[in-house]
């Protein structure tokens, strides 16, 4: 009778009965997937798969979330050759991941002995009767396959002596461990069960896993190398970058050395640590760590492996890596290289995101680096150092790095957890929050711009919104004179950041036309679509700058000291402070990302530091501000601009409750504001005019108010902020 359900199975999911060599293990029971495939949503398919297999639905969600964040990836393989929501391995060319020529043994052995001698994909197909094609391309089929596989592992664990039972989540630990060869995977699954998770994809909708604080997280046994600057639980290894001369025969005072510089960035005498730079490797993990150990190449601080989030530490944080393409940023940053390619998101695994976030939380706390998008930045946000250089600065980690999710893992969500809004007025500062999986954009040329990425995937999530030259999606994309000095419009090409405003970027609104916000961008007015059905900005506060004089203010790619600062260090060559391609024009306003930027230059030119003025920090008196001016940051001299305090921003404005009738009392509710700690004063209005002595939170309605409109006006103030006044909607007195 089960055959009557077959019409519910999509043709792509139907399969001929698997052959005897399909990979089924002795004792395996087949699973009826029709109810899973017929479920109305991906979220509902987990419940159906739980019913079909006996695996708790929450456990299925937690395992697959850690494998893929519930993303089917449009049938593309992940870094370790796995497919779909459960990252089922086995569809790639034998011995390789997805066409990059990376041996699976270099990342994780998802087809090893724990997999009964066959691939996960083949065994899932045998367990379900679904084709491998269906398992790789259909999310709900993949859920059924993953659930069947997990149930089979549990059956085997029970046969091997593990405790039986399906309701007790702890009884599934051995089976969960068999779903991945990643060290610490089971602990990560149980941590996800405890904390909960949520995600939305364009193809499959929202999936929610409610947290359960009663879940006990098992110890994963990982410990970091004592030499590594890393959280102990990450299990980091120490793979030091070499510091050596180009040839042993060279004198110690040679300038021919590599692959980084020695400094005292963690002490009082060296440059400060102010930024954490997020990179991707543009190659696989092993070639990356080979390069960082090459004295003729260059060094960064950490490399993270895609398959399991493994972290290798290469530099003492006191020393300066050569990773940013900008010496000022090198001086002040810690560089993290993530295994992957900028033209695809499939290498940016949940395991790597979580390891990276744990590492960044640790580094930020240790070195007092703010956890915000002004200080935890991509290489694509680094400015060029001289005119003409910006267009050649790298653009990793690219459009597919999920900044929203990353900052959630950092515990500092973009937008501070506030609701997105369309209640925006000229003069407001807003923070862009694009979303990711539910934010696909057209991107082209992924393989050409980042060889090894493969073709761009239609419908893939992205971390940005396009800006336009007019309030229309048919208008040309916004311009960026640094990226395109010829003045041409931005494009959708993967590396073209001209018109891309990323999640976490703050903008000053100049105009509002319907769903469109006119914002200042790269020296011109650009337009951001902020639709009512899915707004992409949240209220924000920030200091802002405008030009101090009549002409434009120059901006810089480095906050170097003024010439006079070198007088105390005559052996240090003066570094010219040269403007780059952008300006702050008259009438324009930009948000300040940091108004305490160090103005300094660290001289490092010889192997042993014996050269004239070597290992010296020159500190200037010039004050610089870091600006959100375009996709890349810039610096502006304080002397060239006027700095404006942030205005108190309303998240929800004032309102009045109560019955508007004589003899009744109305109560004013001030609303919520940024920053959170504000002072509020009240003034009641009758038909727009102040009511004498009515300055409290409550108002007694009198006969004089009959037929009038009553409102409350609140003035909100906070330290170091410009006060703001807001008025409630009117209430007509009956």
Image (cartoon, grey):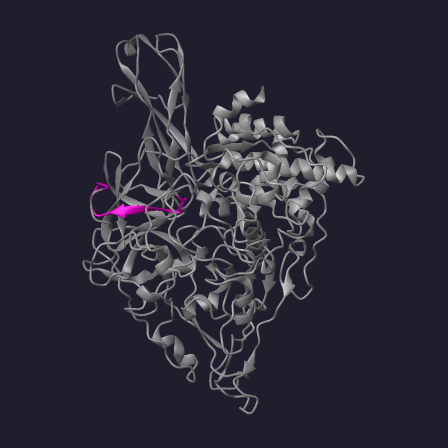
Residue 711 in the image: state x and y as whole percent: 32, 21
Which residue is located at x 32 percent, y 65 percent?
390
500 relative to 672, above or below: below
- Residue 411 showing in the rendered view: no
Residue 471 part of the magenta segment: yes
Q: Name the quarter where the C terminus is drawn.
A: top left
Q: Is residue 626 left or right of residue 1?
A: left
For the N terminus, the image quarter is: top right
Q: Is residue 727 above or below residue 99?
A: above
Give 148 or 661, whichever is nearer the viewer: 148
Look at the image and give the residue range highlighted in magenta.
460-473
Query: For the view shown, which residue lies furthest in the front direction?
Result: 20
x, y percent for residue 529:
28, 40
Residue 689, position as x, y percentages in the image? 25, 22
Report if residue 96 is visible in the image: yes
In which quadrant of the rendered view does residue 548 lie? bottom left
Q: Which residue of the protein is positioned furthest toward the left in this rendering?
A: 550
Compared with 519, 16 (above or below) is above
Closest to the observer, 727 or 411: 411
| Dominant secondary structure of the residues highlighted in magenta in the image | loop
């Amino acid at each position: 009778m089960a055959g009557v359900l077959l019409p519910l199975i999509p043709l792509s999911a139907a399969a001929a009965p698997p052959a005897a060599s399909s990979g089924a293990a002795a004792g395996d029971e087949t699973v009826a997937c029709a109810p899973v495939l017929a479920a109305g949503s991906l979220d509902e398919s987990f419940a159906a798969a739980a019913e079909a297999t006996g695996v708790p639905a929450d456990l299925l969600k937690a395992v697959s979330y850690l494998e893929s964040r519930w993303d089917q990836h449009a049938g593309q393989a992940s870094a370790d050759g796995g497919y779909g929501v459960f990252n089922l391995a086995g569809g790639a060319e034998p011995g390789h991941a997805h066409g990059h020529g990376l041996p699976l043994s270099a990342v994780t052995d998802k087809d090893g002995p724990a997999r009964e001698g066959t691939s996960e994909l083949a065994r899932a197909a045998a367990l379900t009767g679904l084709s491998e094609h269906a398992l790789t391309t259909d999310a709900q089929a993949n859920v059924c396959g993953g659930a069947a596989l997990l149930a089979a592992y549990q059956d085997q664990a029970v046969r091997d002596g593990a405790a039986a039972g399906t309701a007790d989540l702890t009884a599934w630990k051995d089976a969960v461990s068999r779903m991945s060869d990643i060290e610490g995977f089971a602990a990560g699954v149980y941590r996800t069960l405890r904390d909960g998770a949520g995600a939305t994809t364009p193809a499959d909708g929202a999936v929610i896993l409610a947290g359960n604080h009663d879940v006990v997280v098992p110890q994963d046994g990982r410990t970091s190398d004592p030499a590594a600057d890393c959280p102990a639980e990450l299990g980091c290894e120490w793979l030091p970058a070499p510091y050596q001369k180009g040839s042993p025969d060279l004198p110690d005072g040679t300038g021919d050395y590599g692959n980084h510089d020695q400094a005292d960035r963690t002490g009082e005498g060296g440059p400060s640590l102010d930024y954490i730079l997020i990179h991707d490797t543009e190659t696989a993990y092993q070639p990356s760590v080979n390069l960082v150990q090459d004295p003729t190449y260059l060094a960064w601080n950490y490399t993270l492996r895609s398959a399991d989030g493994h972290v290798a530490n290469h530099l003492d944080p006191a020393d300066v890596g050569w990773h940013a393409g900008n010496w000022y940023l090198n001086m002040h940053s810690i560089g993290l290289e993530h295994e992957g390619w900028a033209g695809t998101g499939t290498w940016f695994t949940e395991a790597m995101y979580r390891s990276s976030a744990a590492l960044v939380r640790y580094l930020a706390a240790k070195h007092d680096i703010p956890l915000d998008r002004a200080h935890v930045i991509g290489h694509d946000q680094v400015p060029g150092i001289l005119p003409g250089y910006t267009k050649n600065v790298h653009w990793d980690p690219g459009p597919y790095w999920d900044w929203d999710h990353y900052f959630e893992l950092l515990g500092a969500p973009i937008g501070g957890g506030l609701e997105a809004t369309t209640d925006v007025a000229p003069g407001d500062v807003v923070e862009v929050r694009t979303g990711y999986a539910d934010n696909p954009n057209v991107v082209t040329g992924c393989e050409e711009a980042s060889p090894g990425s493969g073709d761009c995937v239609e419908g893939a999530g992205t971390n940005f919104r396009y800006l336009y030259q007019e309030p229309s999606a048919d208008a040309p994309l916004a311009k960026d004179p640094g990226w395109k000095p010829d003045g041409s419009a931005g494009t959708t090409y993967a590396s073209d950041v001209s018109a891309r405003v990323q999640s976490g970027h703050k903008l000053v609104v100049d105009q509002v036309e319907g769903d469109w916000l006119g914002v200042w961008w790269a020296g011109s007015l650009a337009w951001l679509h902020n639709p009512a059905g899915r707004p992409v900005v949240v209220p924000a506060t920030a200091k802002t700058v405008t030009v101090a004089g009549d002409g434009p203010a120059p901006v810089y790619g480095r906050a170097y000291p003024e010439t006079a600062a070198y007088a105390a260090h005559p052996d240090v060559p003066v570094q010219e402070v040269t403007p780059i391609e952008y300006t702050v024009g008259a009438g324009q306003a930009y948000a300040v990302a940091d108004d305490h930027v160090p103005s300094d230059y660290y001289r490092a030119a010889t192997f042993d530091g014996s050269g004239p003025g070597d290992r010296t920090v020159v500190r200037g008196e010039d004050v610089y501000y870091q600006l959100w001016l375009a996709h890349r940051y810039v610096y502006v001299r304080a002397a060239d601009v006027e700095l404006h305090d942030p205005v108190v921003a309303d998240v929800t404005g004032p309102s009045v409750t109560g019955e508007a009738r004589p003899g009744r009392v109305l109560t004013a509710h001030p609303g919520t504001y940024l920053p959170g700690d504000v002072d509020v004063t009240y003034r009641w209005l009758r038909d727009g005019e102040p009511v004498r002595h009515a300055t409290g939170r409550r108002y007694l309605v009198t006969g004089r108010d009959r037929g009038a409109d009553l409102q409350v006006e609140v003035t909100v103030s906070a330290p170091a902020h410009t006060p703001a006044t807001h008025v409630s909607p009117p209430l007509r007195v009956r």
